[in-house]
Amino acid sequence: MVRLTCMLRRKAGLTPAEFHEHWEQVHGPLTVRLECGSYVVRYEQLPRPLDSYSGDDDPGFDGVTVQWFNSMEDYNAHMAASDFSVMWADIESFLDVPSLHFVVTEEPGRLVIDRTAS
């Protein structure tokens, strides 16, 4: 399994609420319906709570996204899909692209602690 984890910042001029609405209502559904999204086996949006902002110009990250792929081949196919340009245009419409921080990782990872089990 391969994971793309990305730290997100909203584009200048968007309020936190506008950013989160676009991410959930536009970008998420776009990922589901495009061919490039067909390579994604799991897509997580981990939004920053709106009540944690100190104002619309807060410099912190607005959320984290994690996309899971079966293999590096699928990840590369996702990026090379003919409709990835549609996805990228949407990314540029609501994200501060130069400030994106991301990493591609492969399993197995190292589980250090898990206190979620009952």
Image (cartoon, rainbow, N blue to C red):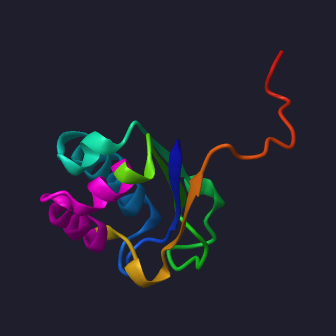
Left or right relative to 4: residue 15: left
Residue extending farthest to the front is 73
From what the image shows, is residue 96 above or below residue 2?
Answer: below
Who is closer to the viewer here, 64 or 71? 71
The picture places residue 86, in percent across and down from the top left corner, at 16, 62
| Main secondary structure of the magenta stretch | helix
Q: How many marks?
A: 0
Estimate the x, y position of residue 89 in percent, counting from the top left: 20, 69
Instruction: Using the image as rendered, state which of residue 68 and residue 54 is in the foreground.
Output: 68
User: Residue, x 36% and y 47% (percent of image)?
Assistant: 24
Residue farthest along the top direction in this orientation: 118
Q: Position of residue 16 (x, y in %)?
A: 46, 64
Q: Nearer the viewer, residue 109 or 22?
A: 109
- Left or right: where 44 falls relative to 34: right
Residue name at image x 52 percent, y 41 percent: 1
Q: Quadrant of the C terminus?
A: top right
60 vs 86: above or below: below
Q: Which residues are magenta?
A: 74-93
41 relative to 8 in the view: left or right:
left
Q: Position of residue 114 (x, y in %)?
A: 83, 33
Identity of the residue drawn at 35% across and 48% down? 74
Say which residue appears at 67% left-offset and 43% top-offset: 108
Residue 81 magenta-highlighted: yes
**The image quarter in which residue 18 lies:** bottom left
